[in-house]
Amino acid sequence: METLTVGLGDRSYTIRGGSGILPGIGAFCRELGLGRIVAVVTNTTVGPLYYGPVADSLAAAGFSPLRVELPDGEEFKTSATLNAIYDALIDGGLTRDSFIVALGGGVVGDMAGFAAATYLRGIPFVQVPTTLLAQVDSSVGGKTGINHPRGKNLIGAFYQPRAVIIDVETLTTLPEREYLAGMAEVVKYGVVLDPLLFAEVERNIAPILVRDRDVLTRIIMACCAIKASVVEKDERESGLRAVLNYGHTLGHAVETLAGYGTYLHGEAVAIGMVQAAKLAEHRGEATADDTGRLRALLESLKLPVELPVFAAEAYREVLLRDKKARDTGLSFVLNNGIGGFSIVRLRDLSEVLDVCGIGG
Ligand code: NAD
Ligand code: GLY
């Protein structure tokens, strides 16, 4: 098992990663001094797979676990589902010294975290991420929330967990597409923040594709260390944390234009990263070789890299949708070679559209 700390003063916490560590959750929560009643918030897919061992371990350590099972899917990341969580917490008699365990992917983690942030003005919660995306990204850093009919993640809070427990064994049941989409976020950290991580992923394609537990533990903990150091410097995204949006600007445009669900988030980010690399190359911040390495790595992880065809006007409209982008230009993260970055503001989108071959 590997551990690391997210250093945020009195809100600091430990991330534990390893294979087969879920049965240790009860003892770990004891060490944290958490109260007796615990709501384990999960969903109808993850609950049947992992609620049992988690609840057994919590009960053996003297806790009283309560199962809260949500419907599965981004479409349920809503105020209605959040209310159902509050109902279960109230019915279960959770008080200020009770806590929540978020057992699932990013959807469960974001919602359970937001419920923890707001129930009784805040109770502790522990993240137990079970998708690769949640293990390398969403479970660390304290962004919690739900969607609003007018947009994704519009309602939320920065609220840090008390601990993160990453059992790579849970990835064995994750569908292949979800797993590989999570790998796009791993590559993201490498391209903009860590050339050694990038090279390690390049060297380990075969073990990654068969989900080798040791390689995964090492890579996931490397990603968590990078995210922790970004969050420690800029918890509320006033600057540096925006680097984590590398590949997301065009990625989001692709998700929107293709219709949510056509591309998984990580797949759209893979496409967006290659476009950002082309722009970096055009501006002399990266070489054709860097772009080629990124493209080859994503392709070897079976991720898409080509922008789907939509009218230039449609791309322009989606990219400039928010008022801030219209007024001051679009904020865009570029890679600097492999392992560095810069954040630029683009007032005129023609350059992006031309470089990415978005004609019309
Ligand atoms: P998800 O939570 O929808 O999980 C993907 C699918 O995998 C779901 O069907 C889920 O039930 C299933 N699943 C989860 N674990 C499994 C397992 N071990 N075995 C089998 N199936 C399993 O999707 P996600 O990609 O994990 O998260 C996406 C969400 O994360 C989005 O809502 C996004 O906004 C959010 N997000 C948040 C942050 C943050 O910093 N808080 C960062 C990135 C993304
Ligand atoms: N996923 C981006 C962030 O946590 O800031």
Image (cartoon, rainbow, N blue to C red):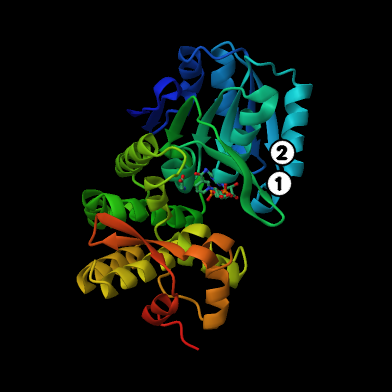
- The percent position of residue 113, horizontal first and vertical second, equals 59, 34
Mark 2 neighbour density, 10 Å: few (under 14) some (14–19) many (20 or more): some
Q: Which mark is residue 89?
A: none
As helix, strand or loop, the secondary structure at mark 1 comes to loop
- The percent position of residue 266, horizontal first and vertical second, equals 47, 58
Observer-nearest residue: 157 or 188?
157
* Mark 1 residue type: Thr
Compared to 183, does 27 lie above or below? above
Where residue 314 sits, quadrant-wise, is: bottom right
* Mark 2 residue type: Leu
Residue positioned most to the bottom: 360
**CA–CA distance between discs 1 and 2?**
6 Å
Query: Which image quarter is the N terminus in?
Result: top left
- The percent position of residue 180, horizontal first and vertical second, equals 43, 57
Observer-nearest residue: 353 or 297?
353
Which residue shows up at 36% across the image and 27% down it? 7
Mark 1 neighbour density, 10 Å: few (under 14) some (14–19) many (20 or more): some
Compared to 229, does 358 lie above or below? below
Which residue shows up at 69% across the image and 31% down it? 68
Compared to 82, does 259 lie above or below? below
Q: Which residue is mark 1?
A: 78
Observer-nearest residue: 270 or 166?
270
Which residue shows up at 22% across the image and 62% down it? 337
Can residue 104 be spotted in the picture? yes
Q: Which residue is mark 2?
A: 82
